[in-house]
Image: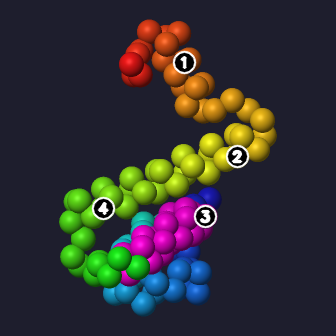
Amino acid sequence: MALEFTICELRWARYHRVSENPHARQGLEFQAARRLAANTLDAYGRDLDRYVGSLEGADIPLEAVNRSTLAGYLRSVAQLRWTLLLAREQALGSSSPRSSLRTFHAVGGWRCWP
């Protein structure tokens, strides 16, 4: 019995910025042609849509993005995720992930903090 693979239908209504930008649209269509799982494509589409939206908000055309622009965006995403994680941990009454990581590195001998 042979397995059949189909290209997942992209739900363009979920990522309207991607659907309107030819370069972003082509990038997501390329991912779909790789026969990735529907959930993976959806995650890629949402991430790309947020990225294109951030660029639009900063008035930067996708074609003009350089390494510095991309690095700045990735730093802001990482900072936002860290902030949300800290807020979640505080709401649950847990210790800060920063202190947990500090302890982990101190006990293991991998000192990253002064």
The amino acid pointed to by label 1 is: Phe
Per the model, the C-alpha gap separating discs 3 and 1 is: 33 Å
The three-letter amino acid code for the residue at tag 4 is Leu
| Tag 2 residue | 88
Q: Does 37 lie within the magenta span?
A: yes
Mark on residue 70? Answer: 4
Question: Can you tell which of label 3 and label 1 is closer to the viewer?
Answer: 1
Q: Are marks 3 and 1 in contact (CB under 8 Å)?
A: no
For the point 46% across and 51% down, the residue is 78
Q: Disc 1 designates what residue?
A: 104
Q: Which residue bears the numbered disc 3?
A: 39
Which quadrant does the C terminus fall into? top left
Inspect the magenta stretch and tell me whether residue 93 lies in it. no
Q: Secondary structure at mark 1?
A: helix
Kindly identify the amino acid type of the residue bearing the numbered disc 2: Arg
Instruction: Name the secondary structure under disc 3.
Output: helix
Of the 4 image quadrants, the one containing the N terminus is: bottom right
Is label 4 in contact with label 1 (beta carbons under 8 Å)?
no
Query: Between residues 59 and 24, which one lies in front from this camera angle?
Result: 59
Q: Main secondary structure of the magenta part?
A: helix
Sequence-wise first label, 2 or 1? 2
Q: Quadrant of residue 91?
A: top right
Distance (Cα) linking label 2 and label 1? 20 Å
Dots 2 and 1: beta carbons under 8 Å?
Answer: no
Question: Is 63 situated left or right of 28 in this image?
Answer: left
Q: Secondary structure at mark 2?
A: helix
What residue range appears in magenta?
36-56
**C-alpha separation, residue under disc 4 versus residue under disc 1:** 31 Å
